[in-house]
Amino acid sequence: MNIIITESQYKYILLEESSNGIIKTLNGLKSFTSKVLKTSEKQIGFDLGFLITWGSTIGGFIGPISDFVKNESVNINDTDLFLILSGVILTYFSSNKQKLNKVLLAIKDRGLVNLFDKTLSKSENLEKVFLSFIDSLGITTHKLSNMIAYAFIIPIIPQLYEISLTNVSESEINELTKRLVSFGGITISGVVVRELIKKIINRFKS
């Protein structure tokens, strides 16, 4: 038996699937960040748990960086990969020089300096491209820390594009924003998240 649904019901289903996909992505980012930090803690003997607060945001930034490292060194093991990523995380998300120096020393001891330097260069390129995108939306980011706070958006841009195809309403954007903010791991306010998502969706529509 064929089941006929209305256009509004179909739209609701698409939005719900996209929203669930976004939450799943953010949850994966948070778990990945936790795994990276916990593995590196064992190597350097320092607690990096304070960075978990930024879980989804950090994951949004280091996800593409992780892919780059694995492409540069196809045989790299998780221990070395996570050590390099921890160096990137501490460079961008922490002002604790002692912990960063500890990671850098471990990177040197494991002969990963050249790969780490390439990774930092790739991180700088990602930062510039992402900052340009954020600026193009009319969102001003005066400080690097402010720019980095938006990084959770990077891996969910495809889902936001899908949502833009449904002619999403203002109230539906508000509902999506509530779900994202309640998830945790995002360090900017709900008002800013809503404005950011709204501008990205409008960019896709245009």
Image (spheres, rainbow, N blue to C red):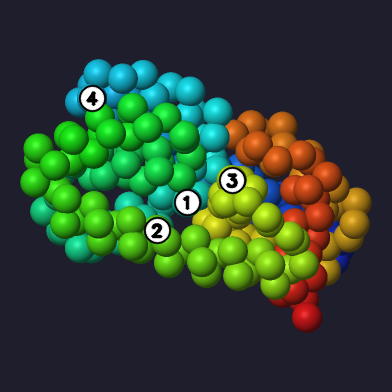
Q: Secondary structure at mark 2?
A: helix
Q: Nearer the viewer, mark 1 or mark 4?
A: 4
Q: Horizontally, is 132 left or right of 49 in the view?
A: right
Labels 2 & 1 near each other (Cβ < 8 A): yes
Mark 3 closeness class: few <14, some 14–19, many ≥20 residues within 10 Å? few
Residue 116 visible at all: yes
Q: CA distance from mark 1 to mark 3?
A: 12 Å
Instruction: Pick whichever of labels 1 and 3 is earlier in the sequence.
Output: 1
Residue 30 visible at all: no
Mark 1 closeness class: few <14, some 14–19, many ≥20 residues within 10 Å? many
Q: CA distance from mark 3 to mark 4?
A: 25 Å
Q: Position of residue 34 (x, y in %)?
A: 41, 30
Residue corresponding to mark 3: 145
Residue corresponding to mark 1: 61
Q: Horizontally, is 178 left or right of 125 in the view?
A: right
Q: Amino acid at mark 2?
A: Ser
Instruction: Pick whichever of labels 2 and 1 is earlier in the sequence.
Output: 1
